[in-house]
Image: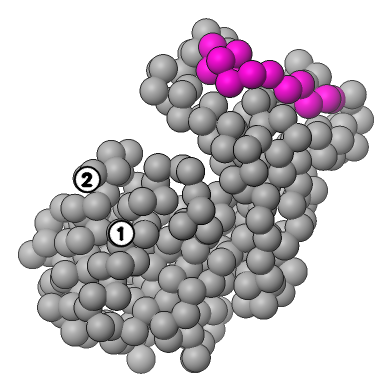
Amino acid sequence: MSIYVTGATGELGSLVITHLLKQMSASRITAIVRNVEKASSLAERGIEVRYGDYSDPASLAKAFAGASRLLFVSSPDSDDTNRIVQHANVVKAAKEAGVGHIAYTSFAFAEQSAIPLAHVHLATEHAIRTTGIPYTFLRNSLYTEVFVNPALHASVEHGAVVTNTGTGTLNTATRNDLAAAAAEVLAGEGHENKTYTLVSDQTWSFDELARIMSEITGKPIVHRAVSFAEQKSMLIHDAGLPEPVAGMIAGIYQAVAEGETSKTSGDLRSLIGTPAPLKDTVKQVLQA
């Protein structure tokens, strides 16, 4: 059985390969990448590296040849219309190459989601179904790292985490846990034509995050709730972010406030065991 991983030098794809190598030899893994030079470390570990660009359909058909199982990591393109085209290229190439099984990194609770990107994921799932290829939809949560990252150091200095999430709760999971779940599906059996909602079964809030940060640093830190307009303005004027980026971030926070990330599922725990506790992730960031 041969396992192919797209986006293999990206943050998620590279972690999936790390987990796969714990379960199988490198000779069974093929890395699909846009920049072959960036994948030299994978080649040195005995992994076959192939060029494949989502915007270059001809490259994909060649790259996917011989794949028993393909992990299709969704495109990082910021334009959702481009994403749709790129994803269609991947799906068509997978069918032409005779791929045996597609595992696709989709989005949790996509049907109920207000986040525009959910449309891309649902469209891609439907496209995969049209091929008749056995599939597994890995409906991932937002990454914990979207919210818990080195930017927290500034919050420690100011004594406050400022967001427009209100009292909303989050069901996030770390990239590493989501990668472990993907590797489990790729290397395991019995996952054909199944959809897994890969979110934490324990939600957290920014009030809780502030308390954890206080415990770790020994400094008083609070969560200060602001409005959408205030958050966007702060991101533009204080953080120096471009207006579209500030609007996107404030929009994600607003979705949290409105319950977008409050639903839970036991699928992630069933696949990998206990997900990483929030406190462990915060420690890694603040003590790095």
Q: Are marks 1 and 2 in contact (CB under 8 Å)?
A: no
In this view of the protein, can residue 1 be seen by the observer?
A: yes
In the drawing, what numbered circle is on residue 82? 2
Q: Tell me, yes or no, whether the highlighted magenta stretch contains residue 42.
A: no
Q: Secondary structure at mark 2?
A: helix
The residue tagged 1 is 123
Image location (x, y in percent) of residue 144: 62, 48
Image location (x, y in percent) of residue 77: 30, 44
Q: Earlier in the sequence, mark 1 or mark 2?
A: 2
Residue at 35% across, 91% down: 1
The type of residue carrying mark 2 is: Asn
Residue at 13% across, 78% down: 96
Residue at 22% across, 78% down: 131
Image location (x, y in percent) of residue 20: 49, 76
The type of residue carrying mark 1 is: Ala
- Residue 72 located left or right of residue 201: left
- Point out the stretch of residues depicted in magenta: 221-233
- Residue 129 located left or right of residue 285: left
CA–CA distance in space, label 1 to label 2: 13 Å
Up the image or down, 53 lies above or below 3; here it is above
In this view of the protein, can residue 282 be seen by the observer?
A: no
- Residue 47 located left or right of residue 269: left
Residue 43 location, quadrant: bottom left
Q: Secondary structure at mark 1?
A: helix
Residue 68 location, quadrant: bottom left
Q: Residue furthest front?
A: 112
> Is label 1 or label 2 in front?
1
- Residue 199 located left or right of residue 19: right
In the drawing, what numbered circle is on residue 23? none
Disc 1 residue crowd, few under 14, some 14–19, many 20+, Cα 10 Å? some
Disc 2 residue crowd, few under 14, some 14–19, many 20+, Cα 10 Å? some
Residue at 55% across, 49% down: 142
